[in-house]
Structures are given as structure tokens and as C-alpha cells.
Image (cartoon, helix red, strand yellow):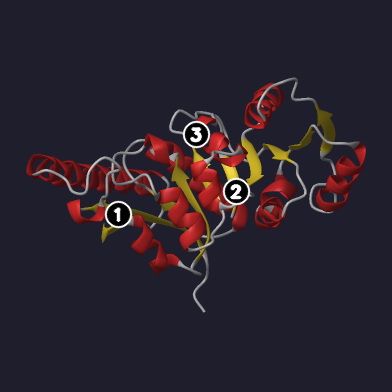
Amino acid sequence: MESKSVLVLLASTVGSAQCLRVGEIASQTLGQVVRLAHVQVGPGSIILPSQEELSEYEAEHLADREQEETKQLVALTSEWAKAHGLAVQLEVFRGDEWRVMRHYRGKVSLVVLASPHTQPVGHRETLRAALLRTGHPVVMVPPEWEGGFGKRLMVGWEDVQPLRRAIAAFAPFLSRAEQVDVVAIEQDQASLDLARQVIAPIAPKAVYRLVSAAGRRTANTLLDEARASGSDGLVMGAFRRGEILNWLAPGTSTRLIHDSFLPLLMSP
């Protein structure tokens, strides 16, 4: 059976350096090799919300942009692999991320990618493709992130299955972290005690605390707590209320995905 690996899915050059850095740390933590992939999309793979098809000019511009992005990514990843002494090459596909992710189903343990809303048109479904098409855990990295990864993790606690799956998926990271903060927002002591039962066997030195939202949204409160504690990763579940409902009426996970300044470690 083929050994699993860490997949760094590079939608574009935006955030690629940050994703490569996090991917390298993740591969070291899991003791797995890194795989690199990029999808070169074509006009037929894109459906814009405002129109059914691209104009001739837009299609031509898209093709030129995609070819240039691919060329730059091949050069960037080749230089990165050489600098780190890794025998890895960028796998380039044509189509769209939804179809390509099927190629990696069951072959990778997690996917590292950049915040989808920061990517060019045609590459904004990467997160949902990784989470929902293949069910893989994902580390989403904001392109502006310049910190480390995995040394100071925070868990936004709520007793829901997506979060429990995320805790299980990222147990190797939680167990190796120098600092783990478990934050329960607008909950009671019983909830915090349950969090301790679940997380203490994985991260014995974790610190637990109850936090009042004080009128803020849960997502904003979590990000404020992460900033105050100097966290370099936030463990969360994704789409507790249902994936479709969250996109129609954005919930906490959707807001975190859009607003986060630090890497998100999530599971569907």
C-alpha cells in the first residue's frame, strides 16, 4: 500500500511560499513526504455567479494567466525543493480542483492550501474540494501569514463532531505543541470539563479557559483570543450547521475562513 503524504495544493503564486513552509513543518510532524500539486483551469471549468460563460476576451486572458501562473509555480517549487534537498516536483493537472482532488483521495493525510477567497477566479473552490470532495483534514494558510506553525495551537472548543474529528486528525500536532490553549466561548464549566476529558490524553499540558463573547461574534472572539495568546494555528471543525446552509447564511466556520490571520486546522 502506498504511504500517505502531505499534499500542498498550490492554486496560484499567492500564498505559495507560506503554504510550502507550513507543508514542510506538517511533513516533519507526521513523518511523511510532501507532494505538490497545481491545477491549471480552463474556461470550461469556471462558472461565474454573474454570467453563464466567459467572453472571448476573458477566456483568452484566463488562458494566458493560467499558463504564466503554472510557469512561475514550476520555477518556484523547483527552487524550493532544491533549497530543502527534496526530490519532489510540482504535479500539474488541467481541469478543476473538484475533479483533481479525486486523484488524491485516500492517498494523503492532510492538504495544505491558501485561503480560497484570496485566489484568482477559477481557484476559489480549493477548500471545499479538499474538505468535501475527499474528506481530508486541511490546513488553510492566509497568504499574509508570516509566523511559525504548530508550536502554539489553540482549540476553539464546542462539543460537535467536526471538531472532535479535527482534534483526532491533528492529534500529532497537538501532542507536540509547546503550548495548547483550549477556549470555550459562552459555555459553562461542564463544557470545559468535557473538553479536558477529550483533549488531555492528547495534550496533557493544555490550558483551558471560559471566555465571554461580550457582544462579539464567536469567530471574532476566537481570533482575538488567538492573537492575544500568540497562537500559530487554530484547530476547528468546519460547517457544523451543514455545508450548504453555512454558505447561504454564513456561520462561525465560514467567517473564520474569510477573516483568519493565522493557519486554520480543520476537518469536515
Dot in front, 2 or 1: 2
Q: Secondary structure at mark 3?
A: helix
Q: Residue at x 46, y 49 (%)?
A: 127
Closer to the camera, 216 or 231?
216
Residue farthest bottom in this picture = 1
Kindly identify which residue carries mark 3.
258
Q: What percent of the width, then of the height, locates residue 63?
A: 14, 47
- Can residue 61 be seen in the rendering of this structure? yes
Closer to the camera, 77 or 167?
167
Kindly identify which residue carries mark 2.
238
Which quarter of the rendered picture does the C terminus lie within?
bottom right
Q: Residue at x 55, y 45 (%)?
A: 246
Q: Residue at x 49, y 43 (%)?
A: 248
Closer to the camera, 231 or 158?
158
Residue 191 picture quarter: top right
Is 261 on the left or on the right of 11, as rendered?
Answer: right
- Amino acid type indicated by mark 3: His
Comes first in the chain, label 2 or label 1: 1
Q: Residue at x 75, y 42 (%)?
A: 157
Q: Is residue 155 above or below residue 9?
A: above
Q: What percent of the width, then of the height, locates residue 105?
A: 47, 68
| Mark identifier at residue 65 | none
Comes first in the chain, label 2 or label 3: 2
Q: Disc 1 vs disc 3: Cβ atoms closer than 8 Å?
A: no
Q: Is residue 95 above or below residue 256?
A: below
- Amino acid type indicated by mark 1: Val
| Mark identifier at residue 39 | 1
- Give the number of marks: 3
Comes first in the chain, label 1 or label 3: 1
Is 175 on the left or on the right of 95, as rendered?
Answer: right
